[in-house]
Image: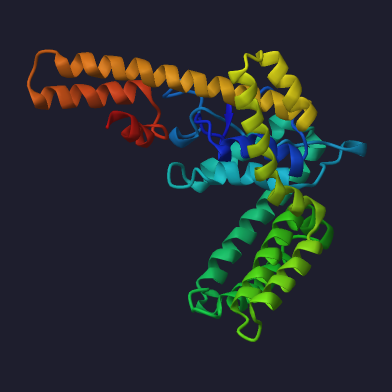
Amino acid sequence: MMKRSTLAFTTLGLLIGAVGGLYYLGSQTEESTVPRAPQDPYAFVRSLEGTRTDGDLKTGPGDDLVLDAELTRMFDYYLSALGEKPLPAIIQQTELELSRKLSPKAAAQARRLFANYLDYKRALIALDSNPQYAANQEGKQAAALRARFQAMQAARSRFFSASESKALFGFTDAYDLDAIARIEVSEDKQLNAQQKQDKLAQIDAAMPPALREEREAPLRIARAEEQVTQMRAQGASEQQIYQFRAATFSPQAAARLAEVDREEEQWKQRIADFLQQRARLLAGPGDEAGKLAALQTLRESKFSAQELPRLVAYEQ
């Protein structure tokens, strides 16, 4: 089944997502990206149909929980259901998943961090109500963003130790600081165009390796997929394409991209089947109102709530 962040449509963004987690958050070895049927009875909420829980949780020496960004990815996966489920139900489901994936000792550590994470999120809601941190004034966006970042760090220190904060949020902090620094350069009216270019080059040079990997990955993936397209046009087998991707990225990434390819083919077939049934329905007997109602029923029987908005492009 798919990760929540992976949709059943092959785009460059999807390919980046399929490879990206392997670059930056550690490779995952679970079976992935086999889409569920619409109206999956096992989904926690409707919007999570066809997805798999985010977060590749691990235990280390002494059965302790390994702290990294995968943990917050799992928390956010379930918290995204707010509005469809009340918070107590989300907390219960998250804790059940922690108990399922981890040993008792590691699960207890993760539950404590989850409770702290919820408190931290509440603190951020209060922080964002402060107009001081609204980055909506031209020429002052960087100052507001940096002030918010510092306030966020102060709030976080109430709920996490320095080591916990670095492990859980280190990558996103680096990403935020890099973005703020670039906005500061763009807003600096004392710099001419060449000086701004030089400043941005300095920021590039100081970029952490993981962040550099993320910025460069889209271009690398795009080039690789152009090569894949050429290989297919020349009659390459799927095994040859897998071997090319494995050598370019990793075996895990190659497997994920192969799943993306399969998803795209499944999606195309589902669309083709739907359009055939749609054409027969519209050409058949009955008044217009009845046909429109039947068409909506057909849509909802064939596609999930997440997929329905994307049918518009195919029905025009």
In this rendering, the answer to whether 162 lies above or below 53 is: below
In this rendering, the answer to whether 291 lies above or below 209 is: above
Res. 143 visible in picture: yes
Q: Is residue 297 left or right of residue 147?
A: left
Looking at this view, name the residue that lies furthest to the front. 234
Q: Residue at x 21, y 13 (%)?
A: 280
Q: Residue at x 49, y 43 (%)?
A: 81
In this rendering, the answer to whether 65 lies above or below 44 is: below
Q: Quadrant of residue 261?
A: top right
In this rendering, the answer to whether 138 lies above or below 65 is: below
Q: Position of residue 56 (x, y in %)?
A: 72, 35
Quadrant for the N terminus in the image:
top right
Q: Residue at x 75, y 53 (%)?
A: 212
Asked which colour scheme the image uses, the reply is: rainbow
Q: Position of residue 6 (x, y in %)?
A: 56, 35
Q: Position of residue 250 (x, y in %)?
A: 78, 30
Q: Quadrant of residue 2?
A: top right
Q: Position of residue 283 (x, y in %)?
A: 15, 15
Q: Residue at x 77, y 58 (%)?
A: 165
Q: Is residue 269 left or right of residue 293?
A: right
Q: Is residue 166 left or right of residue 220?
A: right
Q: Quadrant of residue 310?
A: top left
Quadrant for the C terminus in the image:
top left
Res. 35 visible in picture: no
Looking at this view, name the residue that lies furthest to the right. 61
